[in-house]
């Protein structure tokens, strides 16, 4: 094999490997951020259910 072909393959491999690592890091950061947000905020379903119960209890 010629050295140019080896260098081209190496550059292509490093390029896609770097893109893959970036996607992995961004996905993990997004997931960690979403889980952190959900752990510090109250459950939205409970608030909606409570609001629904309050409006229903005032109806005749």
Image (spheres, rainbow, N blue to C red):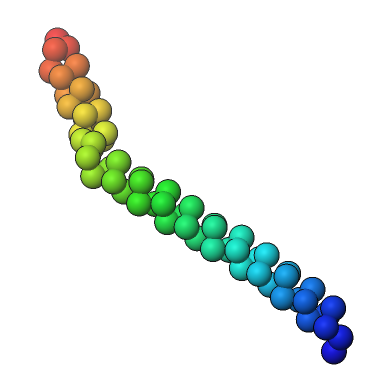
What is the quadrant of the N terminus in the image? bottom right
Q: Is residue 8 above or below residue 42?
A: below
Q: Nearer the viewer, residue 38 or 16?
A: 16
Residue 5's image quarter?
Answer: bottom right
Q: Residue at x 17, y 27 (%)?
A: 50
What is the quadrant of the C terminus in the image? top left
**Is 60 left or right of 11, judged from the image as shown?**
left
Q: Is residue 60 above or below residue 40?
A: above
Residue 46 x %, y %: 20, 34
Q: Nearer the viewer, residue 13 or 58?
A: 13
**Is 13 left or right of 45, judged from the image as shown?**
right
**Is 8 left or right of 44, judged from the image as shown?**
right
**Is 9 left or right of 37, judged from the image as shown?**
right
Q: Is residue 38 above or below residue 27?
A: above
Residue 53's image quarter?
Answer: top left
Q: Residue at x 22, y 23 (%)?
A: 52
* Outermost front residue: 3
Q: Residue at x 78, y 81 (%)?
A: 6
Residue 24 x %, y %: 50, 60
How many numbered discs sit on the rendered protein? 0
Q: Nearer the viewer, residue 11 or 42?
A: 11
Q: Residue at x 61, y 68 (%)?
A: 17
* Outermost bottom residue: 1
Residue 48 x %, y %: 25, 28
Residue 18 x %, y %: 60, 63
Q: Is residue 30 above or below residue 17?
A: above
């Amino acid at each position: 094999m010629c050295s140019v072909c080896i260098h081209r393959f190496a550059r292509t491999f490093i390029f896609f490997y770097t893109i893959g690592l970036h996607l992995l890091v961004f996905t993990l950061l997004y997931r960690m951020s979403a889980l952190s947000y959900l752990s510090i905020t109250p459950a939205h379903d409970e608030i909606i259910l409570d609001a629904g119960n309050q409006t229903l209890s005032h109806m005749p």
